[in-house]
Amino acid sequence: MIDAPEQSIAETFAMLADLGYDGVEIDAPSDLPLDEIIAASAASGVALPGVINARHWSHPLSSPDAEVRAAGVQGMIAALETARTIGAETVLLVPGAVGPEVSYATAWERAIAGLEQILPHAERTGVRIAIENVWNNFLLSPLEAAAFIDRFDHPLLGWYLDVGNILRNGYPTDWIEVLGARICRVDLKEYSRTKMDAEGPWKGFEVELGEGDCDWAKVNAALRAVGYSGWASVEVPGGGRARLADIRARVEALRGL
């Protein structure tokens, strides 16, 4: 989201601190210079709370190809190692996808098999795996999401709740009510059902925070009701300093509802 190519990593972190951001997540595996990122975080006070798995779409755990699945497992292990190195607490994971070549039942079985290989590395690194709800035709309801997490009964497996992704065909408050303490991260994103109906599903995301169909006051109340007080990440089109300042102001306005 940060578009500041003229700035060094240290300067970028200093800018984020000046704008009032508390933390930033990074992708992994990647070629980012982790030593520079760690130093910039320490100097600026901008934390590194989480890592985003960079390979769960290109190498899904549900792939029909066993070698692709194995590479997906290794990518997640590398992301967990990166998280440990930078002191992050979570790694976001999309656990698979359903499609013409992968049935729902098969995706379920392969996701479980992949996580059974990955969880020992979560234990070794002490980093929590956060499963995200996305448009992957899989884990489509909060009851199913809760059952998937409970299938493992593991303290290092939780849920990364993407508010905007739910709004196409549901309500974030329902997911919050059901998932409760399983939620370990929240992803802030907006969605407009009006634009979806008029222009297509993906166009629904083309709306600014606070200007779509998410009832943020109810989301806040639901999160308070289940005792959530962790990080909230913003996943919207980014930019340079002016754009990031606007995003920060919008988040603060939503938080106050």
Image: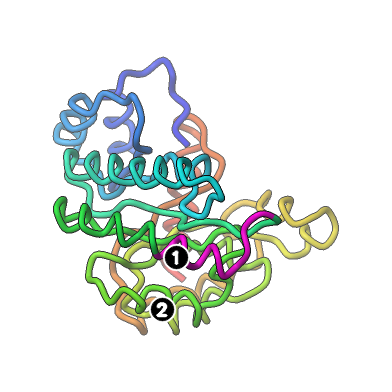
Q: Which residues are magenta?
A: 101-112
Magenta-colored segment: predominant secondary structure: helix
Give me the disc on residue 111.
Answer: none
Q: Indicate which disc, 2 or 1, sits on the residue closer to the N terminus.
A: 1
On the image, the x and y values in percent for residue 22 come to: 28, 48
- Relative height, residue 41 to residue 84 (above, below): above
On the image, the x and y values in percent for residue 177 come to: 44, 84
Q: Quadrant of residue 256?
A: bottom left
Q: Residues within 10 Å of mark 1 (few under 14, many from 20)?
A: many
Instruction: Compare residues 240 and 106 and report the one nearer the observer.
Output: 106
CB of mark 2 within 8 Å of CB of mark 1?
yes
- Left or right position of 6 against 24: right
Q: How many marks?
A: 2
- Say if the magenta span includes residue 110: yes
Instruction: Compare residues 129 and 64 and report the one nearer the observer.
Output: 64
- Relative height, residue 44 to residue 22 (above, below): above
Picture residue at 42% right of the left edge, 39% below the top: 54
Q: Quadrant of residue 152?
A: bottom left
Picture residue at 44% right of the left edge, 78% below the top: 176
Give me the disc on residue 161.
Answer: 1
On the image, the x and y values in percent for residue 82 come to: 24, 39
Colour mapping: rainbow
Picture residue at 27% right of the left edge, 30% below the top: 14
- Mark 2: amino acid: Leu
Picture residue at 44% right of the left edge, 61% below the top: 111
Residue ranking furthest to the top: 6
Residue 222 seen by the camera: no
- Relative height, residue 136 to residue 218 (above, below): above
Label 2: element kind: helix
Identify the residue under disc 2: 179
- Mark 1: amino acid: Leu
